[in-house]
Image (cartoon, rainbow, N blue to C red):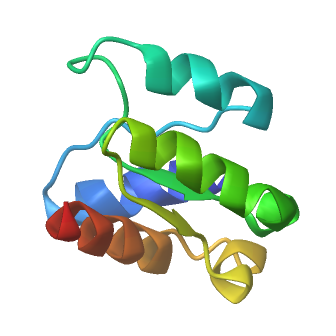
Amino acid sequence: MLVKKMQDAAEKDGVSYKIFATSSADVTNQLSKPEDDRPDILMLGPQIAYMQNDMQKKADKVGIPMAMINMQDYGMMNGEKVLQAAEKLLGDK
């Protein structure tokens, strides 16, 4: 649902991103893909905050910026704010 709201916000802004959700178990697979196929950033939902350090190490290893999604924005399914956070992270890359 949050992914759809982020896609809607991107469309409203006239930009196009490949936005998807995956399981924490699949993150290693996603980050192991060839550079052209792997994500540009990694954002974690608050429900896996306990995995932040491990995920940060994996992201750092391949040079991908990572951040936690704001708990309030996640809970309210505020796709626009989460998209803005993702775009900021992209800008920091």
Which residue is at the front of the view, 63 or 20?
Answer: 63
Residue in view at x 20 percent, y 18 percent: 36
Q: Nearer the viewer, residue 14 or 33?
A: 33
Q: Position of residue 20 (x, y in %)?
A: 52, 36
Residue 12 in the image: above or below residue 1: below
- The location of residue 79, given as percent across then percent down, is 51, 68
Tell me what residue is drawn at x 37 percent, y 65 percent.
Answer: 86
- The image shows residue 73, relative to residue 92, as above or below, that is below
52 in relation to 22, above or below: below
Q: Is residue 75 left or right of residue 78?
A: right
Residue 63 % position (x, y): 30, 44
Instruction: Kindly identify the residue that appears in the image at 55 percent across and 40 percent down.
Output: 58
User: Can you tell which quarter of the image residue 11 is in?
Assistant: bottom left
**Which residue is pictured at 26% across the width and 75% down the height?**
88
Q: Residue furthest bottom?
A: 72
The image quadrant where one finds the C terminus is bottom left
The residue sitting at the top extreme is 34
Expressed as whole percent of the image width and height from the top left, the position of residue 54 reads 70, 50
Q: What is the tally of numbered marks visible in this picture?
A: 0
Please identify the quarter of the rendering in which residue 26 is found: top right
Question: Which is nearer the eye, 24 or 12?
Answer: 24
Using residue 90 as the reference point, say whether residue 80 is left or right of it: right
Taking 74 as reference, is 61 left or right? left
